[in-house]
Image (spheres, helix red, strand yellow):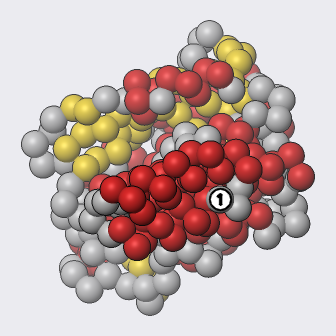
Amino acid sequence: MTSFSVVITVFNGAQFIPDALATVLGQTHAAHEIIVVNDGSTDNSLEVLKTYANRIRIIDQPNAGCGPARNAAIRMATGDYVAFLDVDDYWRADKLEIFDRAVRHCRREQTAFMFSNFLRENYFTKEKLPSNSDLNPWIFDHVELISKVDDVYRTRADQAFRLLVRGYPVYPSTVVVSRDRLNSVLWPECFRLGEDFSFSLLNAAVGPLLYVHQPLSVITRHDRNISLDERKMAVSDVRVLRWALAQEAFSPENKAAVRASLGSRLAGLGWGCRRNDRLQSLKYYASALRYPGARIKSLKGFARTLLFF
């Protein structure tokens, strides 16, 4: 059986800890170990974690951000695979069981980086929101079925990177990565926001991604979610894509996909703030003009913003 180290990061998330840990402790395929990083919380998160001290391993560190926190846990982990969970999300009870079957039934190089579909839910009202695949059905343009048993897919040749730069979101709470891969690819520590996007890109650049279409994770929504700020997330994505252009490990083909995505996203930012921040809108459009695929769209947007708003 596959051994899974579970890594949870916490920053001022005391109220979420019991639910997150309950879904890990209740897995039908028991976790090899659970490592929780208290990333400089100023609430009572550490005290809550200590009540589970006989069932989890705790790292208590000054606040450094999600990337450094996850890497600290990875260095301690001893499982064959590491499964990540944000403290305000939770898992379906058979998540690790299904990933265990995927590991045993697929070739090892196919399972270095795995992720699943997920559901969205309002944390407090429990209102169910559309799944990731409902909102982004075009994932099937980039993947092919390899197992009907658990609805398992892999990215087609050269499609992993394109899937991500096109905008498909891979949330940390859906991700499972092999120890072998983590020996060479860790979470980037240069981002406070966008570390998940950059980590996925690094993995897509070196091999295929395995996708389980079943929604094995629940990503919650509440008033503290940074991801609810769409403009902030869009600006973060642009920052990550610019970082990607400077990575020597990324192929010319991958960088071409990054440039196309950058132009489109910058033009989108220009359109999004055209009424409330005209000057910033013009700056975004001007930046988008550097990328050939977005020039016509950006010129039109620039002209409209300059003349009419």
Residue reaching furthest to the front: 307
Residue at the spot 49% in from the left edge and 75% down from the top edge: 192
Residue at the spot 19% in from the left edge and 48% down from the top edge: 123
Quadrant housing the N terminus = top right
Whether residue 133 appears in this view of the structure is yes
Q: Position of residue 231 (x, y in %)?
A: 38, 60
Compared across the picture, whether 74 is left or right of 203 comes to left
Question: Which amino acid type is shown beneath numbered disc 1?
Answer: Leu
Residue underneath mark 1: 289
Is 158 in front, or is 98?
A: 158
Residue at the spot 35% in from the left edge and 33% down from the top edge: 119
Q: Position of residue 263 (x, y in %)?
A: 63, 53
Q: Badge 1: few (under 14), some or many (20 or more) residues near its Cα, within 10 Å?
A: many
Identify the image quadrant of residue 244: bottom right
Q: Position of residue 243 (x, y in %)?
A: 69, 69
Residue reaching furthest to the left: 125
Compared across the picture, whether 139 is left or right of 93 comes to right
Asked if 10 appears above or below 141 in the picture, the reply is below
Asked if 64 appears above or below 83 in the picture, the reply is below
> Is label 1 in a helix, a strand or a loop?
loop
Whether residue 50 appears in this view of the structure is no
Is 133 in front, or is 172?
A: 133
Quadrant housing the C terminus = bottom left
